[in-house]
Amino acid sequence: MSQTLPATIPASLFEACADSIADTARELSALGWTPATSSNFSMRIDAEHAAITVSGRHKGRLGRDDIMLIDLDGHAVGTEARPSAETALHTQIYRRWPEMRAVLHTHSRTQSVASRLFAGDGVIRLQGWELQKAITGYHTHESTLEIPVFPNTQHMPELVAQIDAWLDAGKPLHAYLIDGHGIYTWGRDMAETQRHLEALEFLLGCELDLKKLRAS
Ligand SMILES: [Zn+2]
């Protein structure tokens, strides 16, 4: 392993997180949600560190060497590897919510099309769907689940600022889309995060189908 760990992080902990990321990435890749080396995944290691996918690797074939350690400022720790270009979006979540332990970012076709279709509104309002209950904190289909759509940019501080502005306005946030790009979601462990991602993929697909059917 080309990764050197600080004395405070047991190898078994890092390896368990790396394996969890690789296993999840393989499943999401098989679904076609991570085309052409896109997407990135991470897990919190402790209060100051996370494990994240190395930039540019195919997400269906990740091994432990494709996962690296970063601090919560997004700097590589104990490795020469380069973290994902969007690392700042992962560390933002870990810094804002100490209880969050996993972040998944994918680029499925459904997520990409929905992000473009709703970019003008800046938000997708999900209402009346039973599967909204798959999102932690939502207990009824009668609730409204808002998924903001932020403009895409290659300049990460701009995206971080837009997300901070949404949160600083006191609005709940469990996931967001980036226009023409993909989705970010997170949770208190990998299983919860994967459940959020699967539910959102399904709900976005339903919204797109409804739009098509109503237009025809
Ligand atoms: Zn991306």
Image: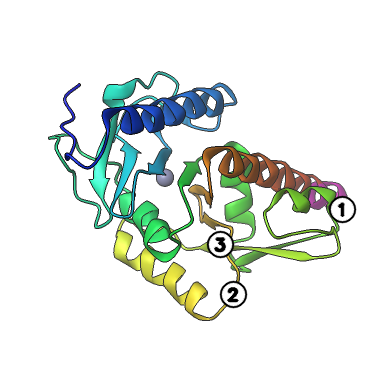
Q: Is residue 90 left or right of residue 99?
A: left
For mark 3, give the secondary structure: strand
Residue type, numbered disc 1 = Arg
Residue located 40% across and 41% down the image: 42
Q: Of helix, strand and loop, which mostly describes the magenta segment?
A: helix
Residues 137 and 208: in front is 137
Which residue is denoted by mark 3 in the rendering?
A: 149
Q: CA distance from mark 3 to mark 2?
A: 14 Å
Residue type, numbered disc 2 = Lys
Q: Which mark, by number, is residue 164?
A: none
Residues 102 and 204: in front is 102
Q: Is residue 162 above or below residue 201?
A: below
Q: Is residue 203 above or below residue 92?
A: above
Whether disc 1's CB lies below 8 Å from ligand 1 is answered no
| Chain part drawn in magenta | 210-216
Residue 200: percent from the left, percent from the top? 67, 47
Q: Which mark, by number, is residue 214?
A: 1
Q: Is residue 121 left or right of residue 169?
A: right
Residues 111 and 25: in front is 25
Q: Is residue 157 above or below residue 186?
A: below
Q: Earlier in the sequence, mark 3 or mark 1?
A: 3
Q: Earlier in the sequence, mark 3 or mark 2?
A: 3
Residue 76: percent from the left, percent from the top? 18, 44
For label 2, the crowd category at 10 Å Cα-Cα, with few meaning under 14, some 14 to 19 and many 20 or more, is few
For mark 2, give the secondary structure: loop
Residue 45: percent from the left, percent from the top? 35, 43
Residue type, numbered disc 3 = Val
Residue located 25% across and 52% down the image: 74
Which residue is denoted by mark 2 in the rendering?
A: 171
Q: Earlier in the sequence, mark 1 or mark 2?
A: 2
Quarter holding the N terminus? top left
